[in-house]
Amino acid sequence: MQSKISQYTTEINAFEPKTAEELETFRIKFLGTKGIIKDLFDEFKAVSPEEKRVLGKVLNQFKQLAEAKFNDHKDNFTTGDAQSKKEDLTLPGEGFEIGGRHPLNLVRKEIVEIFKRLGFVLAEGPEIEDDWHNFSALNFPEEHPARDMQDTFFVQKPTNNSENTAEEKGAYALRTHTSSVQVRLMEAGKPPFRALMPGRVYRNEAISARAHCFFHQVEGLYVDENVSFADLKQTLYYFVQELYGEGTKVRFRPSYFPFTEPSAEMDISCTICKGAGCQMCKQSGWVEILGCGMIDPNVLDNVNIDSKKYTGFAFGMGIERITNLKYQIKDLRLFSENDVRFLKQFQTEVI
Ligand code: PHE
């Protein structure tokens, strides 16, 4: 084995490749998977332990020599002419990935587009709200459970002394719904109003597949003379046909919200089983998508709108819920975990 190695060493030292092919032949002969070095290592396994000590070192040096020779020459042939001959310039270039829109964003956009066609304009408000806009103006009684610590994230008011007074304590909160924007809009202008209010809202709930401490709502508001419940129904009916496709059925169930009277919740025929009954609709054939109602005259009075002259309707929906039904998503947490494998599935448009 020793003599073989020294013979090959001489050969390698003398080797000066002139073409890429010569170098490749060299690589296959010495370094290939069936090459000489592989054979020598196989032979090495069989020698006695004493010999191994000496031979191991020699063999490793020999391997390094062959590799060094190959590496020294490799670069001479992979750049310049030899390389350009191998390259196929007609191949398409390497693509690079650009970001896509978030599914909630896509659906919000779709909702907004539908209502824009009905003449609704967009309105916005702050995420940190005072008690008046989030609760009091909306006719929430003092003791209403939604004001409770369990549902609402209260926010400390910045003061010079570190502690807020008892009075200040409930004064600011992360808005629990976008209905607060209704109040701001009506306070700032005169009817008629026809506005859509998308935004993020916060509730103090444990995070699970079905609940999150924040989510996104779109609220709608329509105030004018002679606005009736029929207008509300027709508006929402149109919205559902546009978003979920023609033939989607709707039904209204009586409900309660402090700021609407009468109030209702609207269901649509299940988007998955089309009403036959499945897991998604808990075999009922219907799924709830929003809350709505005629604006309570107390709310209009609170924002100085003549409730004898004007009436209006409002509705509010969670974008997550609408998106879940549209794409059959079962876990709310997916929306905020930024898992690219999930988000990639919604890249329906190029930005
Ligand atoms: N603000 C209500 C909620 O967050 C939804 C709603 C809006 C209901 C407008 C009726 C009218 O649940």
Image (cartoon, grey):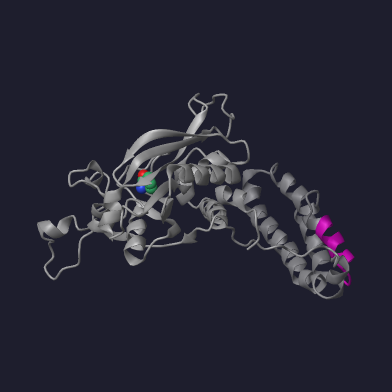
Is 269 above or below relative to 189? above
Residue occupying image coordinates x 41% and y 54%: 225
Q: Main secondary structure of the magenta part?
A: helix
Residue occupying image coordinates x 38% and y 41%: 211
Q: Is residue 133 left or right of residue 87?
A: left
Q: Is residue 173 visible?
A: no
Q: Is residue 106 left or right of residue 13?
A: left
Q: Residue furthest bottom?
A: 80
**Residue 258 image-quadrant placement:** top left
Image quarter where the C terminus lies is bottom right
Q: Where does residue 104 sit, x and y in percent of width and height? A: 51, 52
**Total tally of numbered discs in the picture:** 0
Question: Which contiguous range is marked in magenta?
Answer: 15-29
| 112 or 348: nearer the viewer | 112
Residue occupying image coordinates x 38% and y 33%: 254
Q: Is residue 317 visible?
A: yes
Q: Where does residue 97 sit, x and y in percent of width and height? A: 64, 61
Can residue 16 be found in the magenta stretch?
yes
Q: Where does residue 253 sit, x and y in percent of width and height? A: 41, 33
Q: Is residue 254 left or right of residue 232?
A: left
Is 147 above or below relative to 281? below
Can residue 98 be found in the magenta stretch?
no
